[in-house]
Structure formats: C-alpha cells, structure tokens
Image (cartoon, helix red, strand yellow):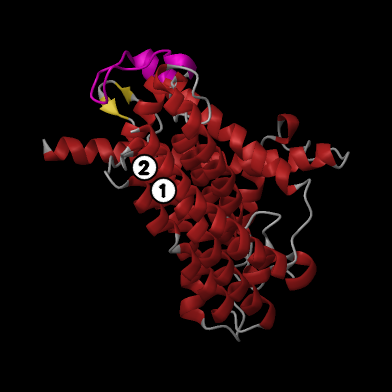
Amino acid sequence: MDWQIIIAASIKVVVFVFLVTLPLVAMSVWAERRVSAAIQDRVGPNRVGPAGLLQAVADGIKFLLKEDFTPNHVRKGYFWLAPALVMVPALMTSAVLPFGSSLFGEKMVIADLDVGPLFVFAVASLSVYGIVLAGWASNSKYPFLGGVRSTSQMISYEISLGLSVVPLIMIYGELNLSSIVLYQAQNGWALLPLWGDGLSLKGFLLFIPILISFVVFMTSMFAETNRLPFDLPECETELVAGYHTEYSSMKFALFFLGEYAAMIIGSGLAVTLFLGGWSLPFGWLTPESADAVVPWWHGLIHIGTFFAKVILLILFFIVIRWTLPRFRYDQLMRLGWVFFFEIALFNVVLTALLMWWLA
C-alpha cells in the first residue's frame, strides 16, 4: 500500500510540475509578449511557429546553448546556489494545491495537508533567500541594491498577505485546501456566493470581509512575485536588471522561471481560496464528499476548470503589468505598512465581530 501511495504521488509530481506548470510558464511568457504587443500596438512574436507559439521553445533552447559565464569577482558558491533557491520553493508550493477533484479514484492533489495555506506561505517565503544571495554574491552595487529592496518588500507584504487569509480560515473553519474548495462548491464561491449557504444573511454579510481580503491578497501577491507595479527589485530603469544583473544562460533562466512559476502558483492559491478551485458555478458536477469517487470525465472537467481560472488570473497579472506605472520605493513601503497592514488587521477584527453577531 505504501508503494502505491509513493508511485501515485510521484506520477502526480511529474504530471503537475513537468507537464503542466513548466509548459504553463512557457505559455505565460508567450502570452505576456502577445498581450504587451497588443497594448502597445505592436505585432509581438509571430515568426517561430503559428502565431509565435514556439517562441518559448526557441528561448529555452537559447538559454541552454548560451555560454554560462561566471564573473571572476563574484562569490561563486553562493552565486551558483541562488537561482535554485528561487526556483525550488516556487515549485514546492504546488504540492498542496488541489487542481481537481479526483481522477480514476485518485485525489488530484500531490500532498493533501491539513495546513495548506501555512505550508504555501512558509515555503514561498524561502525564495527571498535566493534573491538576497544573488544580490550579495554578485559583489556588485546594482544586484546588491536589488537584493536589499526585495528583502524589505517581501517581508513587508508577507504580513498583509498572511493576514488577508485569516478571515477566510475563520469563515471556513478549515486549513485543508481540498475541504475549502469542496465547501465553496456546495455553498457558493467566496467571491460568488450565489447558491447554498452563500444566499443566507450570513453569507451576504461575510462577503464584505472576503472582498477586502481578496483585494489585499491579490495586491500583496503582486508585491511578493515582484510584478509591476511592485518590480522595484529588478527595476530596469534604475538597477540595470536588479539582483540578476550578473547572471546569464540557465542561471538567469532559473530566475525567470521562478518568477513566472511563483505567479502561476499564486494565481492557483487565489483560485483555490476565492474562486472555488476546481468547482463549477452553482454546484454543477459537485461530489457529495471529499472522498467520493467521481466519473473520470467529471474529473477531467474539474481539472480543466481549475486551469481555466488560473489562466484568467495570469492574464490579469499580465494586463496590470502593462497598464500601470511603477511605484516609487517610498510609496511601495508606505502602502504596505501604513495601509495594507492596518486594513488586513481591521478585516480580521471585522470578520470576528460579524461571526460573533451571526452566531
């Protein structure tokens, strides 16, 4: 029985990480180029493959074949370690995301932990060590400034990110992400409470703190993934390329992959907590319990639903990047400490008072 569990988990890791997440990273890069081209009235990639779809493959081959140059002035051991420390946590956090209900009797989650959100935040926060190491080990002023900026930025917004999830945990009474998704499937999504208990007075009133949580969560996720308008750690107009200025070839590619993988996993967590995960609206094709065996075609629809929602959020990330200007650094820190921290803390108190009043 133990071997069956190990084999099933290994298959899910290979499928989700290597056949889903990494190709999704490549397609996100392609989508970023096409969307930015449309916004700026350009053509975008259109030569390599139909509609430029193979441009991501060409870029991957280019990174593999380019010379892996390591400058003499860097601290080599830490310089080589940093890209892996950025990439690995981004992929590890995918282990607890339920990307479907079940398929052929097997739950579509790699590790069904009872502390899902805590695991994601704990592991994702490790990527800042890779960025700090990259900035320090590069032994150059621009990467060092980028590393310092990233450290203070990620620490600042991790607080509001964690606090934004507390009201949801209070409402659901669960830390298991699979159970949270099933609850939303049966009682209305957090942001679409239009069936089940979501139509009650309690569901209507609790929608207010959930909406506040969503705004704080998504904005903090932009800051955590260093996406514009929070891309100060790699700000090209000020710091050349920030913490990865001295990197080339596959080391640079790992930073690139880590950023997009973090964006994809962040979108997956937002979908799981606020948009019903793999569930369809109005309780369609919803299993009766977490352990219920669903037909294989239901399972495929659920998986497709999850990734469709993730892709929509990724497109939202991309559109925001190419429409908003970059913050000044003092504005970024002020927004995190003076506004979002207090708003998230107030939201926790508001949720507690509403639940006490509705009890």
**The C terminus: image quadrant:** top left
In the image, what residue occupies the spot 59% across and 79% down?
138
Left or right? Give the position of 213 relative to 111: right
In the image, what residue occupies the spot 52% across and 83% down?
75
Percent of width and height locating residue 353: 42, 43
Left or right? Give the position of 186 relative to 77: left
Labelled disc at residue 166: 1
**The N terminus: image quadrant:** top left
Label 2 crowd bin: few (<14), some (14–19), many (20+), radius 10 Å: some
Percent of width and height locating residue 201: 45, 24
Question: In the depicted view, which residue is nearer to us: 22 or 198?
Answer: 198
Q: Residue furthest front?
A: 357
Labelled disc at residue 20: none
Percent of width and height locating residue 44: 80, 40
Question: Mark 1 falls on what kind of element?
Answer: helix
Question: Mark 2 falls on what kind of element?
Answer: helix
Which stretch did the figure color magenta?
281-301
Percent of width and height locating residue 97: 39, 40
32 to 346, vertically: above or below = above
Which residue bears the numbered disc 2? Answer: 170
265 to 159, vertically: above or below = above
Residue 262 counted in the magenta span: no
Amino acid type at mark 1: Val
- Residue 288: quadrant of the picture: top left
Residue 282 counted in the magenta span: yes
- Residue 27: quadrant of the picture: top right
Question: In the depicted view, which residue is nearer to us: 222 or 105?
Answer: 222
Callout 2 touching callout 1 (CB < 8 Å): yes
Amino acid type at mark 2: Met
Left or right? Give the position of 2 relative to 82: left
Residue 55 in view in this figure = no
